[in-house]
Image (tube, rainbow, N blue to C red):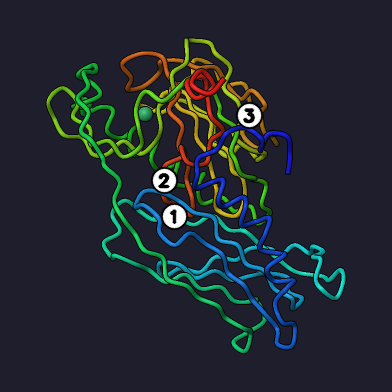
Amino acid sequence: MSGRVSVPLSAFVRITLALLACCLFFVGSAALAAPSLVLDAPESVARGDAFPALAVSDTPTKVFIFRWLGKTYEARAEQVTASTAAGAAARWQAVMLLPVPLEEKEAARDLAVSLGGGKDAPLTARRIALFDKDRPVQKLNVDKKYVDPPAEVMARIKADRELVHRALAQSLPERLWVLPLVRPVPGDVSSLYGLKRIFNGQPRGVHKGLDLRGPQGQPVLACADGQVALTGNLYFSGNVVYINHGEGVFTAYLHLSEILVQNGDRVRQGQVVGLVGATGRVTGPHLHLSLLVQGESVDPQPFLTTGNAAKEKNP
Ligand SMILES: [Zn+2]
C-alpha cells in the first residue's frame, strides 16, 4: 500500500482495503485439494454507489469474468504470491469496480465471477443486498438560460451529450485506478451526490456528482492515473476534463476556469489537470466531480481521501 492509504477513510473503503489485504491469506489457508475461486464484495451496497469486487484464484488465468446486473465485465488477472501453510504459492487476482444505479429496483442482486477459460471454468457467486440512502431535495437559483435553454442551444446540448457518450465508450483494458482516489481539491462537500434538484422552482432531475468547495483558480488534481478522454467547453458543464482510468472507470472535473491537459494525455494521480472555476450551470466557483463506473454515474465520496473538514475534526 502507498503512503496515501494512511489518511482516514470511510469505513466502507477501509473494509474493502482490508479485504484486499487479507483475502490472499484466506485463500492461502484454505484446503488446496480442489481449485478455488474466491469472490469478495460488500454484503450490501447503496443504490447510487459503486463497490469493488475482488476475485482470487489458485488456477492460472489471464482474465476474470464478472457478471453483474445482466452484463459481463472482463478484468485482467494479476499474478501475486500468497503465503500458505505449505509456503509461498502463486495466486491470480483481479479487482473490478461495479455500479448500483440509483434507479435499480431489486432488493438484492447476484454477483458472479468465473475464470476466462470457457464454460467449464469454476464459477463463484454471492448475493448483494441493495438499499437507499437519504437523498434530500436542494433548491437552487441559476441564470434562466440554464433552466429553459433557448432553442438555438438545444443542438449544442445534444452534441455535448454525444461527445461525452463517445468519450465514455473509449475502452482501456488496463486498470490504472487504485483506491482510495485522491481528493481533487482539499475543500469539503457543498452538494452531495443524489440530491433531487429544483432549479428556479422547476424539478430538474438528480445531482449525479459531488460538489467540492474551492476558490476560483485552485488547482484540480487527477484522482488516479489515467488517460484524458475529453476536454472542452460544454453548455451545462462548462470547461471539462474527463479521465479514463481503465476497466470502465472514469472521473470528470466540471466548471473549470482553465483546462491544463489535452485529449489523449497520460496523467498521473495527483497531477494538476485544471483550475477551479464557475463555467456552465453554476451558482459560484466550485468543483463538480463525477465518478463513472461501467457507464453509470455513481457517488465518488466513499472512495475519496478526506479533505479539510475531516482534518480539522481529527487533527
Ligand atoms: Zn455538481
Name the side, left or right, on which 152 lies relative to 59.
left
Number of numbered discs overlaid on the protein picture: 3
Q: Nearer the viewer, residue 240 or 176?
A: 176
Mark 3 vs mark 1, CA separation in Å: 28 Å
18 to 150, vertically: above or below: below
Which quadrant, please, contains the N terminus? top right
Q: Residues within 10 Å of mark 2 (few under 14, many from 20)?
A: many
Residue positioned 30% across, 59% down in the render: 104
Q: Quadrant of residue 209?
A: top left
Mark 3 Cβ and ligand 1 under 8 Å apart: no
23 to 4, vertically: above or below: below
Amino acid type at circle 2 is Val
Give the labeled residue for mark 1.
99
Give the labeled residue for mark 2.
298
Residue positioned 40% across, 27% down in the render: 211
Classify mark 1: helix, strand or loop. Answer: strand
Residue positioned 53% across, 10% down in the render: 217
Q: Earlier in the sequence, mark 3 or mark 1?
A: 1
